[in-house]
Image (spheres, grey):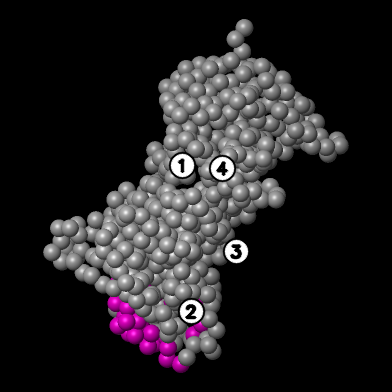
Amino acid sequence: MNTLFRIAFGDYEFVLDRTNLTYSLTETVTKTVWATALSLGWIELKDRATGAVTRTDFGECKLISIAEKMGAAGKRILLGLDAPGGVPIDIYLICGSKDIQLTVEASRDSKTHLLERVGLLPGLASVCTEGEYLFWPTGDDQWPEHLFWEEAEPSHEIAGSIWYTLRMPFLGAVRRESALALLTDSAYATARVSYPKSGMAFNWEYQRDPERRRLDIRIVVLPKGDGVAICKAYRDKLVGERHHRTLRMRMRERPQLESLLGAVAISPITPIPKQEIPEGTLLALPARWQRVHEFPKPIVMLPQWLGLTAEQEVELIHAWQSAGWRMWGTVSIGSDEPLSYTPHYQEPRVAAWREAGMELVSAASYNGLMGHPDGSWEEMEQRLREVRELQTQFSLITGGLNDWMATTTDFCWQFDSCLSHAVVWRDAIVTFSSVAYTSRAANPFLFPRQLLFLDAPLITLGTVLEPIGEGFLAAALAILCPLHQLTFAAFLKSHRFLTPDRQVQETLYTDGTRVVANFREDNYETDEFLLPPGGFYVRHPQFEAHDALRVGTVAFSQRAWRVRRSLDGKPLEQSVQVEEREFEV
């Protein structure tokens, strides 16, 4: 009797052995084999009497029922199992034209055993040779914070929960000719890195769920794909489910969002003691900086940690507004307060701000939205509803960058750009990345890194008080602000490492924008250009900027940031109004 279910759709072939519940998966375009007789999953149970925890493979459970049928979504396989102690497990496999969806329902305890964990597809997303890597959109600010290379094997297992660690609920693996994306909608899922056969692999685990929800995983094979293709698979899912709304769409409903485009933000991200600020500096600063930098569409978040009186705050607001600066007051909503409630200590301040004509922004904190890790899914949905309610009270909503905030946040602070955001959310959320330094020498690679993902600039209050480095900051704003204005509607479509050491990188965007950045300690030279350490080249049809010693056949005797910009909306080659500027940084 044939014991194999063999299914071939689209770019993959999936084979399930019903005798031991192992499977094989081959990507058919490049013939990449992702799985050969791997276990479909396992379940961990705790004995109520002894407290002992045991793990049982699905193939070792008792097969109660099996069915196969064809539907509109694709081929469906239904499995009913009994784990030790009579704990039931229901498994659903739907093999469609573009992906494979695996769902497990195993949330019912028995009289003798309690469910602890369920693992699905252990070892599927694995890499073990040079040039292969795992893609993990984590929530920290490391660089690169989302890639595990073969030489970067940590000494201990790493786990990331959907609730806290991952920016977005997906992960994947990249091999030489193919990529694999694993997507999930399950809030109680955890991704773990394991190390089989001296390589690395991702596994999804389903933690004990107080709401008895099931674990869903969508498997997408991506011929000739890479990390961008993995992120794009998740973006396509959001677009297909109509959970992705671009800034263009949202600006039609809330025109005030347009103020974010091409803006520079100044914020007291780092508190500065009042006694360290020279007398009159804050009042004189906007006029001096507007004169020096010609700030485009400046936005200022009112300093909250300076201990100013209400009268001093109003004086400050009027001084900055008279210099043409847009003033926003940030009302922080912390994790200990309901999101729709303004903390009592801020109420007098908010009233004074309103009277002074300042717009109000609500800062819904990361923790405030996410809640406690043991909280319910309904709690998170309630928090999202409360954030939407804030939009009726405040001009804009800001918060930390993560998938759960993306549908409601207008802009976010982020100290390091990341590939996953540039692919998935770049055309939907304005991300201000920190230019928290005052000269190129302070960190020669930070600006090229920021430029690679075309984020809007964020300057901290501590930076603007520094008298040095104004030429550098003027140059940074002359590049980042116009580029953001031109490219906000585009998203990243390609990211490449141009050298074996991965220190020269290139990004391409859907509107034709291209950025090349050199993070090496020596020059990078091609027929196209010569980039010194920390050098860059960026080109948009209406904009070009570079820190290069040669572009094409034109050589430069010394380094400088050179900018060319079309002022009439035409491509540079056709424009009759081209502004050219040069900055010594």
Which amino acid type corresponds to the residue marked 4 in the rendered image? Glu
CA–CA distance in space, label 4 to label 3: 47 Å
Residue 181 visible in the picture = no
Q: Residue at x 48, y 33 (%)?
A: 221
Q: Please state which of the two labelled residues, at mark 2 or mark 4, is closer to the viewer.
A: 4
Mark 1, Cα crowd under 10 Å, few <14 / some 14-19 / many 20+, is many
Q: Residue at x 56, y 16 (%)?
A: 5
Question: What segment carries the magenta color?
Answer: 279-308
Position of residue 484 measured from the top left corner of the image (x, y, whole percent): 33, 61
Which amino acid type corresponds to the residue marked 2 in the rendered image? Gly
Q: Which label is found at residue 130?
A: 4
Q: Secondary structure at mark 4?
A: loop
Q: Nearer the viewer, residue 331 or 270?
A: 270
Residue 23 visible in the picture = yes
Q: Of label 1 and label 2, which has the lower sequence position? A: 1
Q: Please state which of the two labelled residues, at mark 2 or mark 3, is closer to the viewer.
A: 2
Q: Nearer the viewer, residue 172 or 246?
A: 172
Residues at badges 1 and 2 in contact (C-beta under 8 Å)? no
The residue beneath circle 1 is: 226
- Magenta stretch: includes residue 573: no
Q: Looking at this rendering, what residue extends furthest in the top direction?
A: 1
Q: Please state which of the two labelled residues, at mark 1 or mark 4, is closer to the viewer.
A: 4
Q: Of label 2 and label 3, which has the lower sequence position? A: 3
Q: Residue at x 53, y 58 (%)?
A: 143
